[in-house]
Every structure is written in structure tokens, then in C-alpha cells.
Amino acid sequence: MEKYLKCTFLLATLVMGSVLYGQADINPKENRAAMILEQLKNPSGDYILAVSHRGDWRHAPENSLPAIQRCIDLGVDIVEIDVRLTKDGHLVAMHDKTLDRTTDGKGKVRELTLDEIRAFRLKNACGVRGSRIPVPTLEEIMELTKDRIMVNLDKVEGETVREAYEILKKTGTVKQAIFKGRETVQAMRKKYGDLMDSIIYMPILIDNTKNPAQFVQDYNADLSPLAYEVTFDSEDSENFKQISKLREEGIFVLNIALWDDLVAGHTDEMSLLEGPDASWGWLVERGANGIMTDRPEELLIYLKQKGLRNP
């Protein structure tokens, strides 16, 4: 009888968990990435997503596995990484076209093989050599992050979408990777056709976007994106005006608090100089559902203090 009661209690707990989280096949402890995706699909003012730029590069080399692991440990929702193709067709995490700034080697990524690149070691944020950390592949990153955090792929637009998609299929992580780009939906359709329907794609409204309203209208009519990355150099910009419209349609808005021209000065740095209410809080008040930052730990602390991490 005692065994029966325990089993009944366990079953009830599982069912209640299904109701609370909206989907019976998602266990937040086992698949946090799926829960983050639900937040993208259903943006809320009660839960602001924290997005870390190139991993937590203040604690480990940018785009490295330890920098990404740090984001997972902190509870970051999305880690942004940069991906480039090697000479022999492998995707590695590297922001620049060359290895010169971030490793103890030199040369263009596309002119070196994976083995050649793996022989080098990453530098830290101050450019100091001596780490034992190699450049990771996209496959390694997706294996590390699987079910644990979402990944925002940069530098793939117009170049390596197909290659990245194959790796996501291989690792079973298609639903936790976000592709993004600034090209029109017509241009992306011409390049990738039906593949655009198989990936999570986030259009970018950036300073050189021609006719932002039309850009958004065309994407919404064709792809119905879950989210847009919106940058703006002033509150008078056409990009900024799109934020309220996107929010009215229930579409997730990501702002990039890295430097002035991306958020009209309301950056991570402003949070240090004038307080987080003047930067991150200002963005949230004006429609941000997520914030990309170079200070993920501080952002998370702030959002929790403000009650903005309640799923």
C-alpha cells in the first residue's frame, strides 16, 4: 500500500509539473533550453531573458567552452557566439576573420585547417597569452549546451547557414539555436529556400536597414519570426519606433547593450556610471524582452532584484 501511495504521489507530481510548465514533454530540470524557447515564443514583461555576448569572456577567453560553461552555471538564457568556416569545412567559434587577436597564432580562419587552428591557444580578454584552451568547434559547443541553454549564432548569415544546420541536426539541437541576420527575407529565401522554415531565424534591425517598417512587414508575412534584434542610435530612429509595434504583435524584442549606437547610449557601461535603472531598466521599460550584455552576472542580479525573472 505504501509503495502504491508513493507511486500515486509521484504520478500526481509529474502531472502537476506538466500543467505548470504548459507541456508534458518538457522537464525544466532536464531541458532548460526548451523552457527558454517557450519564453521566446511567449514574451512576458515578468521574465527578461539574459543574453551573454561571446560567452562570459571576462572570466574565460571569448567564444571558448569555459566562457560558455560559465553562462550555463550563472543561469544565462542565451549565449551568443561567432562561427566561421575553416579551409577544410569545419565550423569553429571565432569572431574575427583572422586568429591574430584572440589566439597565439596568426592567419585567416578560411585559409587554415581545423588541425592547424586547434594547435593554437586562446588569449584572455586582455590579450594575454598562455592559456591551455583551444578554439572550439560548433559541434563541441552544441554538445556542451544541449538542453541547457540556447545559442545565438552570429557570422553565419549568407555564408554558413547550411553547414551550421547540418551540425545542429547531428547533435539534435536544431530547436535551441537561433540564426540571425540583417538581409531582407527575399535575399535569405533566395539563398536558402525552404531551409528558412526549418530554423529559428531572428532578423536584425540595424542602422543601415532600409525602410525598417517594410523590412519587418515582409519578414512577418513570410517567416513569422519569434524575435527581432533591434538596434537604434536614438529614440527618433525608425528602428526604435518598431519596438512598440513588435510588442503589440507579441513578438520578442532583443536589445544589444554593448555600445552607444546600438541602444542610444543605454549600455552596460551606463549601468556602471549611472546605475542599472538608467541602462537595462530603461530598455525594459521601452519594450525589451531580452538584453545582450557583456556583464551577464550583474545583469542577472539586477533582473532578479527587480522581479524580472519570474517565469
Image (cartoon, rainbow, N blue to C red):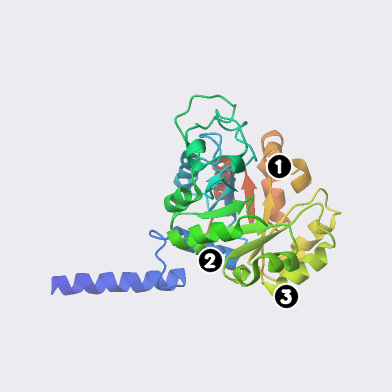
Q: Secondary structure at mark 3?
A: helix
Residue under circle 1? 267
**Quadrant (top left, top right, bottom left, bottom right) of the N terminus:** bottom left
Quick one: label 2, few (<14), some, or many (20+) residues within 10 Å?
some
Is tag 2's residue or tag 1's residue first in the polypeptide sequence?
A: 2
Residue under circle 2? 38
Is tag 3's residue or tag 1's residue first in the polypeptide sequence?
A: 3
Distance between the Cα atoms at labels 2 and 1?
A: 27 Å
* Residue drawn at point x = 47 percent, y = 49 percent: 141
On the image, which quarter does residue 112 sit in? top right
* Residue drawn at point x = 40 percent, y = 73 percent: 24
| x and y, in percent, of residue 138 in the image | 50, 50
Disc 3 residue type (three-letter): Ala
* Residue drawn at point x = 15 percent, y = 71 percent: 3
Distance between the Cα atoms at labels 3 and 1?
A: 32 Å
Q: Is residue 14 above or below residue 309?
A: below
Residue under circle 3? 221
Distance between the Cα atoms at labels 3 and 2?
A: 22 Å
Q: Is residue 71 left or right of residue 293?
A: left
| x and y, in percent, of residue 233 in the image | 81, 48
